[in-house]
Image: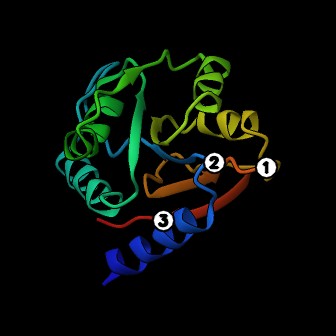
């Protein structure tokens, strides 16, 4: 039932954006395995969250997926990328400006899987003025940004 309500909220947000305006779904990578070194895989909980994300975004008309060079972002995006038949584009984690430029050039909707310390800067680079902080132990944030005219932010949490 939680997934249905969240999916309906996203569907409404996507439907109200004009066809020319991309909708960008931004999430932090899912839970990582510990210990995992500098580039850990996802934990079992993280894998479940990644699968939940794919189910939630299944009707969101994703045409681009952006990840960083780290396995945890790639593994979080993998189920959505597979379901949408989109090959993820790897962007360096510290290149927020470059990623924002790629997003602004889009003609369709996108999923961005980033990190808790880079997502606030990305959202700011997309002209959202709402300050964003992501607690270290929170992997449930789903930021939905409409780039129509004056960018708008919808902030949700997705369960698994």
Is 128 on the left or on the right of 142, as rendered? right
Crowding at dot 2, Cα within 10 Å, few <14 / some 14-19 / many 20+, comes out as: some
Q: Which residue was labeled with disc 3?
A: 157
Secondary structure, mark 2, is loop
Q: Which residue was labeled with disc 1?
A: 149
Q: Residue at (51%, 20%) from the top-left corner?
A: 93
- Nearer to us of marks 3 and 2 is 2
Q: How many marks?
A: 3
Residue 107 x %, y %: 54, 37
Residue 134 x %, y %: 59, 49
Quote the CA–CA distance across marks 2 and 1.
8 Å
The image's mark for residue 21 is: 2
Quote the CA–CA distance across marks 3 and 1.
25 Å
Cβ–Cβ under 8 Å for marks 2 and 1: yes
Is tag 3's residue or tag 1's residue first in the polypeptide sequence?
A: 1
Residue 143 x %, y %: 56, 54
| Above or below: residue 97 compared with residue 106 | above
Secondary structure, mark 3, is strand
Is tag 3's residue or tag 2's residue first in the polypeptide sequence?
A: 2
When asked about the image quadrant of residue 127, the answer is top right
Task: Check the picture and name the quadrant holding the N terminus.
Answer: bottom left
Quote the CA–CA distance across marks 3 and 2.
23 Å
Residue 130 x %, y %: 79, 53
Q: Residue at (27%, 39%) from the top-left corner?
A: 81
Secondary structure, mark 1, is loop
- Nearer to us of marks 3 and 1 is 1
29 vs 56, nearest the viewer:
56
Is 68 on the left or on the right of 120, as rendered? left
When asked about the image quadrant of residue 65, the answer is top left
């Amino acid at each position: 039932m939680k997934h249905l309500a969240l999916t309906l909220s996203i569907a409404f947000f996507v439907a109200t954006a004009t066809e020319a305006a991309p909708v960008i779904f931004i999430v932090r990578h899912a839970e990582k395995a510990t210990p995992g070194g500098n580039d850990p895989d996802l934990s079992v909980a993280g894998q479940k969250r990644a699968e939940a994300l794919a189910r939630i975004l299944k009707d969101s008309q994703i045409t681009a997926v952006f990840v960083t060079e780290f396995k945890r972002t790639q593994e979080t995006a993998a189920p959505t990328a597979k379901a949408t038949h989109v090959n993820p584009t790897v962007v360096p984690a510290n290149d927020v400006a470059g990623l924002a430029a790629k997003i602004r050039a889009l003609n369709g909707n996108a999923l961005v899987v980033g990190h808790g310390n880079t997502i606030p800067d990305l959202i700011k680079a997309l002209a959202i003025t709402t300050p964003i902080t992501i607690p270290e132990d929170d992997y449930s944030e789903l930021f939905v940004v409409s780039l129509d005219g004056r960018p708008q932010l919808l902030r949700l949490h997705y369960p698994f």
